[in-house]
Image (spheres, rainbow, N blue to C red):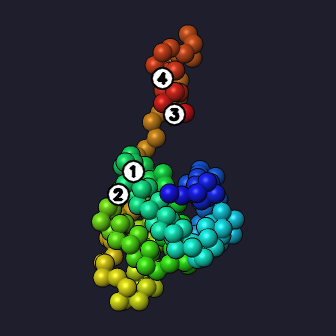
Amino acid sequence: MATTALNELFAEIESVDFSAQLSPANDLYCLTQLMANNPAFSRLVLLARVNIRVAREVREEAEALLAEQADPNYLHPHDRAIAAYLFALQASNIVELVAALKAVYNSQPPNLWWTYRAYNHLLKVLPSAATSYEEIPYEEIQISQPRDVSPTWEAQEHGPDSTDVEQVVQLS
């Protein structure tokens, strides 16, 4: 069972803010540099290095996120967090990393752009004896076009009706 401090780190790494901080990355090098400069990620790596139970909980958290159902039309909401957990395990505990890689390979949920790139990279840098998994062939993620939620002519002239309000509620 994760401690309160560890749960707070998980919440921070799984937050929209963390994902937004990593969004300027255009390759794995940039992504890992942005992660390394993030205080929550750095604390997680340090804790996982000094405590094997923390490393196990990081792997379990990654597995839990992989098991979550995500809309296949959009990027997985925890893509960057799962990738961060893989890199944290690389820096702290190879045994738990291999178990996490196995979970990625076995589950393969859709639209994990960064996670699959991290997975394939980590397979290349791990000693060949550590894992026998194959690379995951991934296609470019196809994000569906956003729905048109601009107000209709009638809504502009007569004010919002219930369908306009429902659209706004669905977007928030």
The relative height of residue 107 versus residue 137 in the rendered view (above or below) is: above
Q: Residue 68 carries which label?
A: 1
| Residue for badge 2 | 109
| Residue for badge 4 | 166
The relative height of residue 140 versus residue 145 in the rendered view (above or below) is: below
**Can see residue 30?**
no
Disc 4 vs disc 1: which is toward the camera?
1
Q: Image quadrant for the C terminus?
A: top right
Which secondary structure lies at badge 4?
helix
| Residue for badge 3 | 171
Q: Which amino acid does label 4 sit on?
A: Glu
Q: How far apart are marks 4 and 2 (CA)?
A: 29 Å
The relative height of residue 28 versus residue 156 in the rendered view (above or below) is: below
Q: Which residue is drawn at 47% across and 68% down?
A: 56
Q: Residues within 10 Å of mark 4 (few under 14, many from 20)?
A: few
Earlier along the polypeptide chain: callout 3 or callout 4?
4
Q: What residue type is labelled 1?
A: Glu
Q: Which residue is more in the foreground, 153 or 77?
A: 77
Q: What residue type is labelled 3?
A: Leu
Disc 2 vs disc 3: which is toward the camera?
2
Label 2 with label 3: CB-CB less than 8 Å: no
Label 1 with label 3: CB-CB less than 8 Å: no
Q: Is residue 142 left or right of residue 9?
A: left
Which secondary structure lies at badge 3?
helix
Disc 1 vs disc 2: which is toward the camera?
1
